Amino acid sequence: MTRSAPSDEKGGLAEGLFFDIRSPDTEEHEAIAAQRVAQLNHVPLLLGIAHLLCLAAVVVLSRGEFGSIHAMYVFGTVALALGCDAAGFALLSLARRHQLNPRTVTLAIGLLVGLSGLMMSFFAHLSSWIPAMNGGPMLPLLIGTSITAAAIVSIESPPLAVVSAVVGTIGTALFSDNPLFAGSIAALSLLVVGYSVVGARTMIANARQRLALAHEARKALHFVTEFENSGRGWFWETNSRGTLSYVSQQLADDFHTHPDALLGRQFTDLLSVDQNGDVMREERTLGFHLSARFPFSDVVVRAATNDDVHWSLSGNPIFDQRGRFLGFRGIGTDLTEQRRNEQEISRLARFDSLTGLPNRAMMRQTLEEALRNAGFRRKGCTLFLIDLDRFKNVNDTLGHPIGDALLRQVAERLKLAIGDHGQVGRLGGDEFKAVLPGTVETGLLESLARTLIDQVSRPYQIEGHRVQIGASVGIAIGDPERSCADSLIRNADLALYAAKAAGRGKHKFYEASMHSEASDRQVLENDLRQAIDRGELWVAYQPIVRSASEEVAGFEALVRWNHPTRGPVSPERFIPLAEESGLIPRIGEFVLRTALSDAAKWPDAVRIAVNLSPIQFNDPGIVDLVSSALDASKVRAERLELEITEGVFLTDSDATDDTFARLKALGVRLALDDFGTGYSSLGYLRKAPFDKIKIDQSFVRGAASSTNRNSAIIRAIVTLAETLGMDTTAEGVETHDDLALIRELGVSQVQGYIFGKPMRAVDASEVATKAHAEADGFSCIREPRQRLMRRAMAAIDGKPTEIRLRNISAMGALVESDRPVSPGGMLTIDIVGVGPVVGTVRWAQAGRFGVQFTEAFDLTRLAPKVEKRAPSAMLTPWYVNQQRDLAAG
């Protein structure tokens, strides 16, 4: 017999008529035939009841005439009919026990119905021979009863209906002389046959549909049973509250209980909270996906049993058509036997082997799922791109094992900083990513970014090394149903680049203008790569002068770039670009060799100062480079002064100390640049053999002002340097007042515009030959001034006097007054609409005098007062507020 899948085709007229007497040729046919044969179980019983009723009617209506030969024939016919009924009942019982062919059973029942009809017709005919029943309504009654019984028992099977119709019609025609009665019986029989065929067709079609569904259900159940019985896994399902609504037997077996005992329990109650790092990481991943309603796959957890049972869980959230969460449905696999191998394979595919964080592929999947989920939740998603600052220095100086250990510690800090707000992953190298689904509030995002940067920037202790790095963060916010993963990653990358350009250790939100800025940076970077070969870079020299004698002590070499179309490009713009693109070593070598070549033409007493970036300093070949450049230029090593920033100490290691020692062995001088702007650790001065400290210009400019404490800071630095036997250089000196203060504080050397701006090599050679520089500049730095005239009152010689103030600054003002004053006197001036200020008269002329305020005056007090009004209530779309928040961020 041919096996075939269930068919959905509905049988035609011929199939409905002959289906029951055809030999089954398919499994479907056989199954439907068995169902139809089962409907014939009542046929012998109903026929037997009909025959007994007919017999009872004859007995009652014959009035006791049982002795005639005709009565004997009647009773014999009924007995024979009842015997056929019993044979039919026995046949059906035998068919059920021995599963006889449905076609054979149907044909046998059809023969039974035919014989029954013939016998009942003969029975009716014989009954009319009984004198008591002759001429009465008995014959039509018996024939009708017979036909009705035959119709009832055969209506379920068209072949039986046909047999019943033929026998009834023939019997009526033979034994009844009433044409109307015979025609009615024939019409009724034809109607029963038609109804039976239609019913059979409908039943067969419905049976086929049920068999198709049952076939699919059996196939699915077979797959489920086969899967579970194979020991490879089991199925689970939860409702929206997280409680189990379906449990496989294998899952129940792990807990030595019945599946019904686990229904209604929280799914997470089946998981064990273990202190093992790997298990905890996986369980946090599972908890994140369950709470965020994200699909997950192959998440390895430990069962909350006394046995060492581990599962690999996969699941998908279920949502209805309106986006309502209905629960999770998934599968689990017992990994007790092969847990280690399978877990390792899964982790390599989805997790970073070094840090244990989700890798690039999984983070991409997490981001895409978060964006899809944002459409259901109607709430956006935020992406953090995190780049470690100065990490390359660690790898280059301390080696990759230290770098790997550092990355592991960074990963732990990132997870703590992000917490439950999202998922952190590693993209590779020193790049990390964090996906924060449903978090779009700029205030919270800024707080998280600042916390993240602070945590990463704290010092690390790794195998006896003190390591310090930083982090920059780019932030992009995706709107629900309007952002894709690629655009969000691109935007976050642009924001990260802007954060780096802002000085590192910063966070930036994506702005639309960053696209054009990124394009311009790319073009500028490409131009910078060719600038050296094209001769666009050149070296400028700014004089460094001894503060006491104003003799030229040396020059600082500063790189400059004249772009062929852009013109001069600011170093503040292209130097960070060179560091990021890896061009700074090449540019640094160009500056070093050019500066030494030019310095060879100067007097032997004039030094040349060259900046070394942390990247250059940490290059193992820096000492050889410096030695090669000195040999090529024939400049004495003592004339070369290398300026180094505190960035070289962020990888506090033996390699750093070794580089310092080798440079000093060459005989070059070392200067600590920008002192005071970083951490300014005194340990740097104790460990590194510096010859000079350069005081940053932020402390020098305006140091002569009495409103700041810069002079005290400079005095402390000078005292420290003198104690350690070091020189000091004050950068950014521009005014005579500041120069006088620098000399008074004992600073060794001065560098600033007051003695000259950065100049070409030809001009520097001329200045070096003169060996003397002259200070040229303003006497002091003029503060911002308010030019508008303001009326005021003051008590001059004890008399209230109206005065007028002009050129008002934070330090003082020009006063016009009709009453003369004397220098040195104190005045309390009440400015109309502002309030009183106290000052000292510094100079006086006819009708005018200058006053210096005792305390710094806030110029914003002079701004006109604006009446505050309550803002108008106005409804705005949500996206307008969001864009406004982003712009504010």
Image: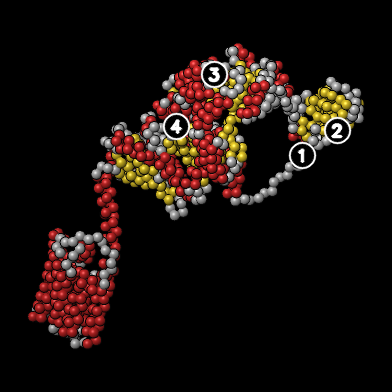
**Who comes first in sequence, dot 1 or dot 2?**
2
Picture disc at residue 411 = 4
Q: CA distance from mark 1 to mark 4?
A: 52 Å
**Mark 1 or 2, which is nearer the eye?**
2
- Residue at screen point 62% across, 13% down: 722
Q: Nearer the viewer, residue 452 or 157?
A: 452
At numbered mark 4, what does the secondary structure look like: helix, strand or loop? helix
Q: Nearer the viewer, residue 841 or 855?
A: 841
**Mark 3 or 1, which is nearer the eye?**
3
Label 3 amino acid? Answer: Arg
**Who comes first in sequence, dot 4 or dot 3?**
4
In the image, residue 192 sits, relative to residue 658, either above or below, namely: below
Q: CA distance from mark 3 to mark 1?
A: 65 Å
Residue where numbered disc 3 is placed: 636
Q: CA distance from mark 1 to mark 2?
A: 20 Å
Mark 4 crowdedness (10 Å alpha carbons): few <14, some 14-19, many ≥20: many
Label 2 amino acid? Answer: Arg
Q: CA distance from mark 2 to mark 4?
A: 64 Å
Picture disc at residue 865 = 1
- Position in image of residue 400 (x %, y %): 41, 28
Tag 1 near tag 4, CB within 8 Å? no
